[in-house]
Image (tube, rainbow, N blue to C red):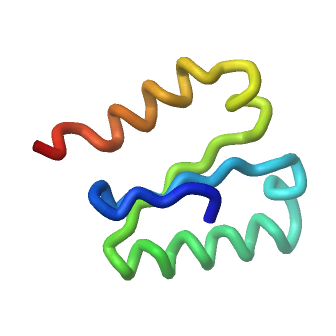
Amino acid sequence: MDFFCPKAKLVIEVDGSQHSTGNVADTDKVRDEFLSTLGLRVLRFTDTDVLNNIDGVTEKIFESIGNLG
């Protein structure tokens, strides 16, 4: 887990290329499903997106959070 916001029940993962293939991708999927059973949402971004499209990444995070009041 790279970042966690308890108030939003949001987990943010920043993944390198190794997360897109093989056992790592399968492990990530199982982990995301487990976190979901805890009532948490998981957003995954590639490290390339974070480095080259931080505006798009932050927009997606804000959309996911919505209005926490």
Tell me where residue 58 appears, x and y as whole percent: 49, 28
> Residue at coordinates 50% horizontally, 75% vertically from top-left?
33
Q: Please identify the quarter of the rendering in which residue 47 is found.
A: top right
> Residue at coordinates 87% horizontally, 47% vertically from top-left?
17
Left or right of 35 in this view: 63: left
Tell me where residue 45 appears, x and y as whole percent: 64, 42
Q: Nearer the viewer, residue 67 or 24?
A: 67
Left or right of 9 in this view: 22: right
> Residue at coordinates 33% horizontally, 33% vertically from top-left?
63
Is 33 situated above or below 7? Answer: below
Tell me where residue 54 appears, x and y as whole percent: 61, 23
Tell me where residue 52 appears, x and y as whole percent: 74, 20
Q: Please identify the quarter of the rendering in which residue 8 is found.
A: bottom left
Is 35 situated above or below 14? Answer: below
Q: Tell me the quadrant of the picture where the C terminus can be found.
A: top left
Q: Please identify the quarter of the rendering in which residue 67 is found.
A: top left
